[in-house]
Image (cartoon, helix red, strand yellow):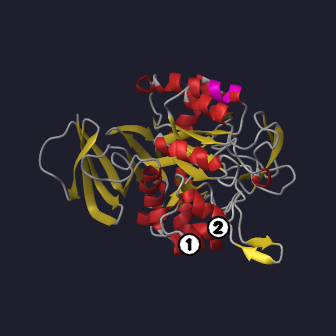
């Protein structure tokens, strides 16, 4: 099937094509340009002057609309995936927070079973693989993770998980823990992206970890060490290491709550759009509307959360517990709050996360021979239409 998408501003990774178009055939981009191309088409999609963006890529997302992926049911997957697809996500990495080995083994099994049914489903993003967020974290940086579950890497445990599935694409680990460097080497040898997360590492420890497969930082500033005193002497943390290492990629939760305007601007100023991935870190209560102060319960982490200013907050109010956003909201926040151009905000929601997990050859930008996954934003940057494999899958 040959599809024409016309009357759009095409958002490229380094600029725009005004009065542009894109052509897709059999799910692959075959042409982009300005004006109207010659030829006949099976389907014509009118963009009504909106922005044609690559489909959003979310590499860190736990759930939404009342479910989390680690609930390990087909119904949970159906509801979560459709909610995030409506928000513009066309490729997703279901993310499992810290849990027992038994829970993990069940979760990766259910992921594989659901993945085998992916082509039968309608209105869901592509499942690219699993992001394991835990359980190998620092107790001092537990955040919303249950302290009783997190611990240093245990070879018998992680080998059981790795041997039970081929779908793990990314793993977040506190790199300073005993055994974490060896674990990083193993993951790298298997082609799995390793991210520094929920960690109290010093800048020196981050530098060492870089040579053991660690290539990114999970939700920068959230559950990350910063400059601190070691006795009377100051030493840098993960944030400073990330700022100093030009090639170290960072995730940020740009929901307008996790990071205030000044930090969004600072991270962008230091790292630039080539090294920042926008992630939702959305939990089970994302994709819904709540009254201010509403109390909800997390059955996995076994504690209550409070909804304040459209973000989930831990009971002691000392930290957040994950966002409620879909990816379209992140793009709008980077433009409106951080003052980033739409082109760069979109790149941070598409090409950079795709690069982190090794998928940039096929997704993440509007280029000939890449997958025909698109999002059309209206002039207010709200998600209007989602196109998957060259076919409309969502119309908002």
Residue 103 is covered by the magenta coloring: yes
* Element type where label 1 sits in the image: helix
Give whichever of 232, 67 is nearer the camera. 232
* Residue at 48% across, 27% down: 115
Q: Which residues are magenta?
A: 102-106
Callout 1 crowding tier (Cα within 10 Å): few <14, some 14–19, many ≥20: some
Magenta-colored segment: predominant secondary structure? helix
Give whichever of 328, 158 is nearer the camera. 158
Q: Position of residue 195 (x, y in %)?
A: 58, 52
* Element type where label 2 sits in the image: helix
Residue under label 2: 203
Give whichever of 171, 63 is nearer the camera. 171
Q: Position of residue 8 (x, y in %)?
A: 32, 57
Task: Report the mark closest to the observer, 2 or 1.
Answer: 2
For this view, does 131 lie left or right of residue 140?
left
Q: Position of residue 393 (x, y in %)?
A: 41, 36
Residues at marks 2 and 1, CA–CA distance in whole angstroms = 9 Å
Q: Which mark is residue 107?
A: none
Circles 2 and 1, Cβ within 8 Å, touching? The answer is: yes
Q: Which mark is residue 244?
A: 1
- Visible in this render: residue 330? no
Residue 321 is covered by the magenta coloring: no
Q: Residue furthest left?
A: 39
Of the numbered discs 2 and 1, the one sitting upstream in the chain is 2
- Visible in this render: residue 236? yes
């Amino acid at each position: 099937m040959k599809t024409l998408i016309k009357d759009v501003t095409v958002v490229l990774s380094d600029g725009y094509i005004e009065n542009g178009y894109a052509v897709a055939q059999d799910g692959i981009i075959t042409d982009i340009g300005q004006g109207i191309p010659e030829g006949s088409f099976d389907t014509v999609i009118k963009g009504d002057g909106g922005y044609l963006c690559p489909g959003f890529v979310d590499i860190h997302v736990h759930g939404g609309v009342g479910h989390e992926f680690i609930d390990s049911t087909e119904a949970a997957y159906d509801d979560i995936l459709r909610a995030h697809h409506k928000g513009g996500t066309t490729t997703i990495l279901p993310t499992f927070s810290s849990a027992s080995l038994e829970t993990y083994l069940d979760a990766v099994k259910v992921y594989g079973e659901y993945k085998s049914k992916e082509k039968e489903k309608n209105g869901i993003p592509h499942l690219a693989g699993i992001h394991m967020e835990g359980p190998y974290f620092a107790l001092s940086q537990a955040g919303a993770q249950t302290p009783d579950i997190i611990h240093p890497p245990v070879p018998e445990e992680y080998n059981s998980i790795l041997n039970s599935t081929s779908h793990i694409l990314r793993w977040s680990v506190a790199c300073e823990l005993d055994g974490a460097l060896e674990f990083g080497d193993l993951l790298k040898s298997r082609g799995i992206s390793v991210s520094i997360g929920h960690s109290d590492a010093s800048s020196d420890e981050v530098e060492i970890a870089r040579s053991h497969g660690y290539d990114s930082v999970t939700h920068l500033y959230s559950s990350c060490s910063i400059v601190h005193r070691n006795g009377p002497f100051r030493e840098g943390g993960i944030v400073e290491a990330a700022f100093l290492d030009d090639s170290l990629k960072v995730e940020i939760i740009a929901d307008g709550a996790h990071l205030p305007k000044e930090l969004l601007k600072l991270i962008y100023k230091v790292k630039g759009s080539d090294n920042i991935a926008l992630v939702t870190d959305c939990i089970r209560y994302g994709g819904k509307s709540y009254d201010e102060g509403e109390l909800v319960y997390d059955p996995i982490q076994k504690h209550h959360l409070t909804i304040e200013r459209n973000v989930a907050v831990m009971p002691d109010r000392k930290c957040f517990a994950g966002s409620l956003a879909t990816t379209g909201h992140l793009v709008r926040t980077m433009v409106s709050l951080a003052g980033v151009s739409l082109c760069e905000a979109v790149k941070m929601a598409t090409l950079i996360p795709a690069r982190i997990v090794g998928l940039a050859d096929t997704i993440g930008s509007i280029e000939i021979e890449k997958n025909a996954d698109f999002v059309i934003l209206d002039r207010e940057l709200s998600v209007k239409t989602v196109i998957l494999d060259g076919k409309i899958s969502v119309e908002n």
